[in-house]
Image (cartoon, rainbow, N blue to C red):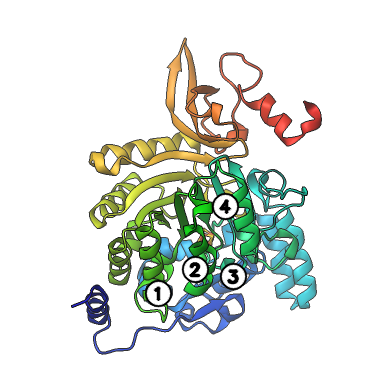
Amino acid sequence: MSQLDHLNRTSASLTGDKTPPRFKVFMARHLDGLDVLKRLPEETVFEMKVVASVLPFRVNEYVINHLIDWDAVPNDPIYQLTFPQRGMLSEEAFERMAALHRADAPRDEIQRLAQELRADLNPHPAGQMELNMPRDEDGDVLDGMQHKYNETVLFFPSQGQTCHAFCTFCFRWAQFVGQQELRMASTEAGALHGYLESRKEVSDLLVTGGDPMVMKTAKLAGYLEPLLSERFEHVQTIRIGTKALTYWPHRFVFDDDADDMLRLFDTLVEEGKHVSVMAHFNHWRELESPVTREAIRRIRDTGAQIRAQGPLLAHINDDASVWARMWETQVKLGVVPYYMFVERDTGARHYFEVPLERAWHIYRDAIQQVSGLARTVRGPSMSAGPGKVEVQGVTEIAGEKVFALRFLQGRNADWVHRPFYAKYDPKATWLDHLKPAFGESRFFFEEEYATMQNPRLA
Ligand code: SF4
């Protein structure tokens, strides 16, 4: 029996005699007609509509029918992960938008207010638009790419600028709301390949989105297969950022071109590339689905590695036992726990944010519960403007209570793993809330970072 026969057989056992489910998506305009919401109070559905006119909403039938435990709503983590909640907008923003809905205001009026409210939600955190955009030899900006750290280029293929469902906390939310000026995407394989060829220091390409797994395999292959030529020998690792293992694991099991995707991974691995699926998980519940488990098994059979990452979020996973169980389950399934992130300073952040001190306690309590193999996970880490900053802990030095911090990644590689200290602040939720400890006026990297932001200061 060939490997594919074996895979097909196992896939069939997941569906029994039934045909595999179709991918069916629901958006804001479908909220009124969704049967499953009829069990919720009318006011809750109205609130969802108000929030969904500002922040993106998209969910699919599989998430509704197989992942959300509707008896546990509103506390169910997958419901919180995908369905809009009133608290995701400030009280004032909510009331202004609700008033328009109550008055049955015209669509363009709702759109205008939505744009105004979005502008207050820091749509492009960490200088994504200004600082990370690479340029070609003529100095023109290359759309759909970011180059923040020397060794890694991020690529945003335009066909991958959506997801199988949207996360309510998404830091890329601005890309999904249809405002052209907030988007970053590329249609151009040529630009990607030209840039990579000219930058021999780049060892890692991260294909991201949205979710590149919404793309057809043939499209993705058009970007990736050319990297097998000698010109790209320096690009050793291909990372693919995705949440499809949660929202649509069928992508790797039942979709028409699922086997082609696995063959693509297989070929890349066979030809010497390291393929790493950077899977986004927020809760162990996402790993319980039999289709997810089958998808993980199939991906690993190709020789690709799966690494898991996700943010720490109030209402979803701000509990050490949730993380410990998630990491243990990942290790059991052969997935490598990689990052615990701090919720970013954008979108509905005030709803999800957890103070840094508490985030560190949750990380520490969770890591103490798991074996060494699950302790590969780093965090809690902030993907801030200057780099990825890890909260190492709260401690006391020379009589002063401080946060110990370090860069896991920095705009200047020399910053990495250099310890630095901030005054203890129990309310701080992000790097820019922190002040240097020991009476210093600025953190060691701040001057250089200011120059990077504004070269005229040099
Ligand atoms: S899967 Fe990723 S990009 Fe898509 S909505 Fe969720 S966090 Fe955002």
Disc number placed over residue 221 in the picture, else none: 2
Whether residues under marks 2 and 1 lie with C-beta atoms below 8 angstroms apart, the answer is yes
Q: Which residue is labeled 4 in the image?
A: 154
Identify the residue at the far left of this view: 1
**Residue 191, quarter of the rendered image:** bottom right
- Picture disc at residue 159: 3
Disc nearer the start of the sequence (2/1)? 2
Of badges 4 and 2, nearer the viewer stands: 2
For the C terminus, the image quarter is top right
Q: CA distance from mark 2 to mark 1?
A: 9 Å
Q: Amino acid at mark 3?
A: Gln
Residue 113 located left or right of residue 202:
right
Residue neighbourhood size for the residue with mark 1, other residues' Cα within 10 Å, grouped as few (<14), some (14–19), many (≥20): some
Q: Amino acid at mark 4?
A: Leu
Q: Which mark is residue 260?
A: 1
The image shows residue 399 at horizontal and vertical percentages of 47, 11
- Label 1 C-beta lies within 8 Å of the nearest ligand 1 atom: no
Pinpoint residue 431: horizontal percent, then vertical percent. 58, 34
Is tag 1's residue or tag 4's residue first in the polypeptide sequence? 4
Pointer 4 local density, CA inside 10 Å: few below 14, some 14–19, many at least 20: many
- Tag 1–tag 4 contact (CB < 8 Å): no
